Amino acid sequence: MIGRIAAVVLTLALVLPPAGRAAELTLAYALDIALERNRSLTSAQARVAEQEAAVKAARADRWPSLDFSQRLTRIDDNTVNRANAAAEGLSQLIGIEIPPFVYQDGYRTQFELAVPLWTSGGLAATIAAERRSLNARRADQEAARRAIRSEVVGRFFALAAAGEVRLARAQAFERAERRLAETEHRLEVGLTTRQEVLRWQVEVEGARADLAASEADVFVARLELADVLERGPEKIGEPRLPAAELVAAFLAWADGLEPYDVLARAEDELDTLPEVRAARAQAAASESAIRGARAARWPRLDAAASYGWLENDTLELDEFEDWSATVRLTVPIDLRGRLRAQIARTTARRTAAETAIADTRATMRLALGRALAEVIRARTRLRSAARAADEAAARRQLLARQTEVGLTGLLDLIDADTTLVAAEVAHATARVELLAAVAALEITWPGADPPGGGLIP
């Protein structure tokens, strides 16, 4: 008796939501939370910001650079005195006054302006490579966002399916308890036997065990959704599924999907997917990097201008001014093969990037095919499950009436209850699976146009 009470208390504790949990959780709200707090998306945004800084740095190399330098030279007093004493003695010897020429502190100030005149297209190629790498990073960011949405959709509907199964198990448990109570009452008035009561007690305990197992499944699904949302599981409400009318509209829409026709229509749309755009941008960046590496083998022309002056304790500025202007031609001689190796490395990267385009397109085409196949399987399962649930409900209703008038036995009714529970669970699961398949197809195929605007905002 104590064990039964403990089991009931545990079941109620799992069924009732914790205090403070939100009443409902919509798919749109779950997606907003995930996109706002996800760590991988934050990392992708940081990589985009890093590449934006790299583009700015590459563009800055095209503009003149101005450098300022100042140098302080300090000489000890004894050296200064000896040098100036020697100058004074020399003045007396030759009869010409020589001013002091060694000072304790001297300042050298210098400005240098450098302007790149011609770089054989190297700077332009470098800028193009960094800019295309930025496009690839941005496409990667979109791909990360799409992957997050796909993960949220999967876990959201997994929790919804677990909740539907739990509801069906709870209803089966309530029916079994009501049937047990009716049988015990019939036993009291002598209309049944003790054996039938024992059989319903076994049925009730089996239904309680199934309900506890479904509660555990709900708990695990809630933890998995909380992980991707980066929230505590106690703060996640019950998933709110679309109305039955929208599910019926999805089912009718799914009937019009022909896999080969969709694949043919989606062929051109594959290039709009962020994964494919990232691969193409990376290949373009590799091509620009090759041009930059080849340009480094050709001459480079730079202009530089310098202006400076020397100051000390007594001399005036204009007596020690100097300036210079230089045009420098640099011709690289690749004796050690460094430039050739760099060109070979960037060429290999371009080949790998071009191969990645075809691989990515093939991967996304396969993902689209799997999403279509899942929608087709889900629509078939839902229709079959709906028919099976209707037939099981009608059979159980008939057997319940026959049992009341003694036309059939208890075992047939128990079997009908078991069949009805399984059919209801299968129908609830198939309904959620269709919604999950439609949402996954929306994410994989940009051209999908399900009724009601779809599930993905």
Image (cartoon, rainbow, N blue to C red):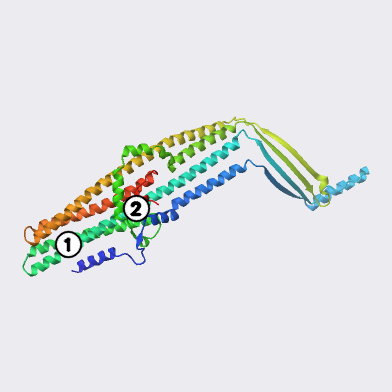
> Is the residue 233 above or below the residue 320 in the image?
below
> Is the residue 427 above or below the residue 373 in the image?
below
> Is the residue 407 above or below the residue 61 in the image?
below
Amino acid type at circle 2 is Arg
Q: Position of residue 106 (x, y in %)?
A: 78, 50
Please indicate whether residue 323 sits to the left or right of residue 345 in the image: right
* Foreground pick, 299 / 94: 299
Q: Which residue is mark 1?
A: 176
Q: Which residue is mark 2?
A: 155
Distance of label 2 from label 1 (alpha carbons)? 31 Å
- At 19% from the left and 51% from the top, the residue drawn is 388
Q: Residue furthest right?
A: 95
* Foreground pick, 157 / 390: 390
Q: Quadrant of residue 358?
A: top left
| Quarter occupied by the N terminus | bottom left
Q: Position of residue 2 (x, y in %)?
A: 20, 69
Which mark, residue 58? none
- At 17% from the left and 62% from the top, the residue drawn is 176
- At 49% from the left and 45% from the top, the residue drawn is 138
Amino acid type at circle 1 is Ala
Label 2: few (<14), some (14–19) or many (≥20) C-alpha neighbours in 10 Å: many
- At 73% from the left and 40% from the top, the residue drawn is 305
Q: Position of residue 128 (x, y in %)?
A: 55, 39
* Foreground pick, 266 / 237: 266
* Foreground pick, 111 / 225: 225
- Mark 1 secondary-structure assignment: helix
Please indicate whether residue 212 sits to the left or right of residue 202 in the image: right
- Mark 2 secondary-structure assignment: helix
Please indicate whether residue 275 sits to the left or right of residue 318 in the image: left
